[in-house]
Amino acid sequence: MGALRISTRGIALIKIAVLARILLPAQFGLFGIAMLVLAFLEIVTETGVNIFLIQEEGDIDSYVSTAWIVSIIRGLIISLFIILLAPLISYFFKSPDSLKIILLISLTPLIRGFINPSVIKFQKELHFKKEFIYRFLIFAVDGTFAITFAFLTHAAVSLVYGLIAGAIIEVAASHLISRPRPRIRFEGEKLKLVISRGKWVTAAGFFNYLFENIDDGVVARIMDTASLGIYQMAYKISSLPMTEVSDVIQKVTFPVYSKISEDKPRLKKAFLRSFWGTFVLVLPLSVALLLFPGPLVKIILGERWLGAVGVIKILAFFGIIRALTETTYPLFLSLKKQKYISLITLISILGLVITVIPMVKSYGIVGAGASGLIGSVLAIPMTAYFLNKVFK
């Protein structure tokens, strides 16, 4: 999983470095608006089926066909909603140029709906070598197509073409390398079981979406697409410690915790090791971002992105706190305490919502970053309370 993260982030870094020199910040902002819409609809329609399949003991093959039918229907619904809402969204953000990109991105969830749910077995059964091959292929295709079309078109739509190409490869690979392959078969009882356990996963995902994107929406609405492009790029760079270390550890620990969830002393020992391991790995990366944001921006993005330097300093602290807080999420999921994650994220949202508009109006994108930091700090006491509750 570490190799996967390093290699895919390497591809992403090359992709960003090249595209940042071809496209303008405003063009990244247009793509950012489309991604806000796509991510929102994907979150509010999330069924929690992948979490359920990992939590479920024993063989999960009997659930694959039902999960596939649900995924296809969900993808179709998301695509239709994007098409219907596209004119309103471009009007809301005062960005008529975003309409074409929003309409085109509606193809992505439609294609992804046909992914074979059996791919979750790579994670459930700890077959991370297969996960590496599968994910690396998707990232490589996405990056290659996005860069190629950017050279040809010099347009923001090239980012969407990369996304669509990656989705097509993801579907094809899922059916080629994972078994069993799904059939057109729907079982109502299995669906009810998945939904009953997945409702808190949906809530947690929705709250997490709000926490990660409310500031983007406020920046786009109050400022402009160029400011949104700079802010989103700053967020990507400053969240490197959280995504490059914490995400890898979470992906590995969740299935492991699920296997030892009945042995509380062993579970606690495993959690503490992963927590302190995350801290040791994240801290140097965050300190580097805090001390050298200017040179990093010049090297990775180029001179015209130097407006991101101020907000990177703020978000470096945000990355540390989020990385450590999110080490608890796979623990709570393994214990089927999805509710705890929803409540922790809800507290973060309240802190963000209360502060983001006045902070953006007063301090621009730096204020947006500060409001996210405030929200993450407010979640610390509740996280500690739930940890104590599961281990007492």
Image (cartoon, helix red, strand yellow):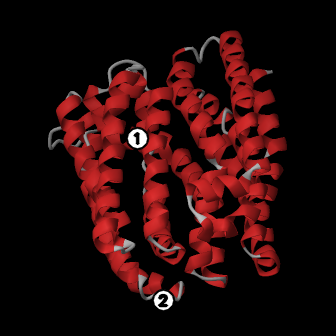
Residue position for label 2: 91
Q: Quadrant of the C terminus?
A: top right
Residue 105 pos. (x, y %): 34, 68
* Direction from residue 82 to residue 237 in the image, left or right: right
Q: Secondary structure at mark 2?
A: helix
Q: Relative to 254, is 354 on the left or the right?
A: right
Q: Amino acid at mark 1?
A: Val
Determine the residue positioned at 67% across, 67% down: 306
Q: Residues within 10 Å of mark 2 (few under 14, many from 20)?
A: few
Q: Position of residue 253 (x, y in %)?
A: 56, 24
Give residue 9's position: percent from left, percent from top.
49, 42
Q: Secondary structure at mark 1?
A: helix
Q: Which label lies toward us, 2 or 1? A: 2
Toward the viewer: 105 or 190? 105
Instruction: Identify whether 293 is placed above or below 245.
Output: below
Q: Is residue 60 visible?
A: yes
Marks 2 and 1, the one that precedes in the sequence:
1
Whether residue 181 is visible here, answered yes or no, is: no
341 above or below 308? above
Residue 273 picture location, percent across and down: 70, 18
Instruction: Using residue 60 as the reference point, say whether residue 297 is left or right of it.
Output: right
Q: What mark, if any, has residue 355 been given in the picture?
A: none
Q: Which of 286/95 is in front?
A: 286
User: Are the two marked residues, 2 and 1, in contact with CB atoms closer than 8 angstroms?
Assistant: no
Say what amino acid the circle numbered 2 marks: Tyr
Q: Residue at x 71, y 14 (%)?
A: 269
Task: Please identify the quarter of the rendering in which residue 126 is found.
Answer: top left
The residue at the point 51 percent across, 50 percent down is: 202
Residue that numbered label 1 is attached to: 49
Per the model, the C-alpha gap separating discs 2 and 1 is 34 Å
Q: At 37% from the left edge and 30% from the top edge, which residue is drawn? A: 132
